[in-house]
């Protein structure tokens, strides 16, 4: 795909995810990204809104410079901010809201670099859906997010979600997410589609912009279903065997192929 087309799709995906009707993000909540080429990606600039963001609201970042922050320990907040700013491919690019040192990449830039660095992941959408956060901010969060409830949840969102206990935003969160993705891939032998962060929100990882929207929509639906089950005695989860069968059944694989997913 042409880089221009990737950025166009990223803008459209972001505007869709920020649509108030979806109740996934309000004001400056959430951030999105897409792989531009082998070495760089676009990420939402700090202070922009998904609902209204345009091309100028994205900053192009070097994977190498963003990921190098994972190895740097004991940096002050100011130093992290400076290093994320220095990961911009061209410090003069991007318009967007006026900030003191030009357009500043999202504080979650390193997190996006980790996700986009995974095999088959080209677009990432991070939102704070109300239905998902009702669960992620609850007393029973660990049980609630631990299993799967219905077939389409497995098909679109994968056999399980990566769950991250509450962690400070920025580099500490990126490190934690990176480690947890590694553990998930050891267990399931595939790249995760959904990451759930306690008291924070959802990350959808997709091969395409459309897939990120589909994963987000299904994760929100699953959250609403889950909340409903707690009014009627609690969720009746699928067994790991049922999940594994749905995740590998030939007809489900066919559906994913129809949906355009790389498998
Ligand atoms: Zn967030």
Image (tube, helix red, strand yellow):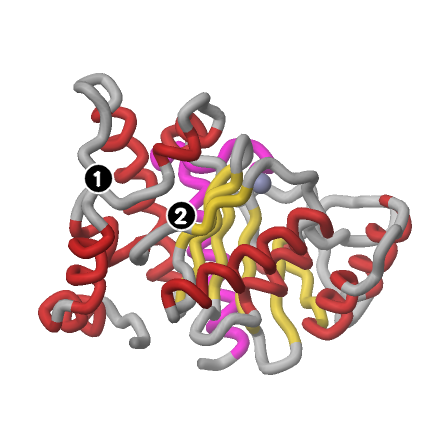
Query: Who's the residue at 27% across and 38% down the image?
Result: 221
Q: In this view, does 79 lie to the left or right of 125?
A: right
Which image quarter holds the N terminus?
bottom left
Position of residue 134 relative to residue 40, above or below, is: above
The residue to which callout 1 is attached is 237
Secondary structure at numbered mark 1: loop
Determine the image quadrant of residue 20: top left
Which image quarter holds the C terminus?
bottom left
Give how far apart the Cα atoms at labels 2 and 1 are.
30 Å
Secondary structure at numbered mark 2: helix
Ligand 1 shows up in which quadrant of the image?
A: top right
The residue to which callout 2 is attached is 16
Q: Is residue 233 left or right of residue 89?
A: left
* Outermost residue, top side: 231
Segment tinted magenta in the rendering: 3-29
Q: How many numbered discs, if any? A: 2
Q: Which circle marks residue 258 in the picture?
A: none
**Residue 111 image point, x, y percent:** 62, 56
Dominant SS in magenta? helix
Can you tell me whether the CB of the residue at mark 2 lies under 8 Å from the nearest atom of ligand 1?
no
């Amino acid at each position: 795909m042409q880089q221009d087309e990737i950025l166009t799709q990223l803008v459209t995906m972001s505007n869709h995810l920020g649509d108030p009707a979806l109740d996934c993000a309000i004001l400056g909540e959430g951030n999105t990204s897409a792989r531009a080429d082998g070495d760089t990606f676009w990420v939402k600039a700090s202070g922009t809104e998904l609902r209204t963001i345009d091309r100028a609201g994205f900053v192009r970042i070097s994977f190498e410079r963003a990921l190098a922050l994972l190895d740097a320990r004991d940096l002050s907040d100011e130093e992290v901010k400076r290093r994320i700013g220095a990961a911009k491919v061209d410090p003069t690019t991007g318009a967007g809201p006026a900030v003191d040192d030009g357009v500043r990449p999202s504080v979650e830039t390193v997190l996006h670099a980790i996700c986009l660095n995974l095999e088959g992941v080209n677009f990432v959408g991070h939102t704070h859906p109300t239905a998902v956060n009702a669960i992620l901010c609850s007393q029973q969060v660990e049980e609630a997010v631990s299993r799967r409830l219905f077939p389409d949840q497995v098909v679109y969102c994968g056999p399980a979600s990566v769950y991250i206990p509450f962690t400070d935003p920025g580099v500490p969160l990126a490190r934690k997410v990176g480690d947890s993705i590694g553990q998930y891939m050891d267990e399931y032998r595939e790249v995760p589609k959904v990451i759930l962060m306690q008291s924070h929100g959802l990350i959808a990882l997709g091969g395409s912009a459309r897939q990120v929207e589909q994963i987000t929509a299904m994760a929100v639906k699953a959250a609403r279903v889950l909340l409903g089950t707690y009014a009627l005695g609690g969720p009746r989860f699928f067994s790991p065997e049922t999940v594994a069968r749905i995740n590998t059944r030939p007809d489900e694989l066919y559906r994913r192929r129809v949906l355009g997913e790389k498998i």
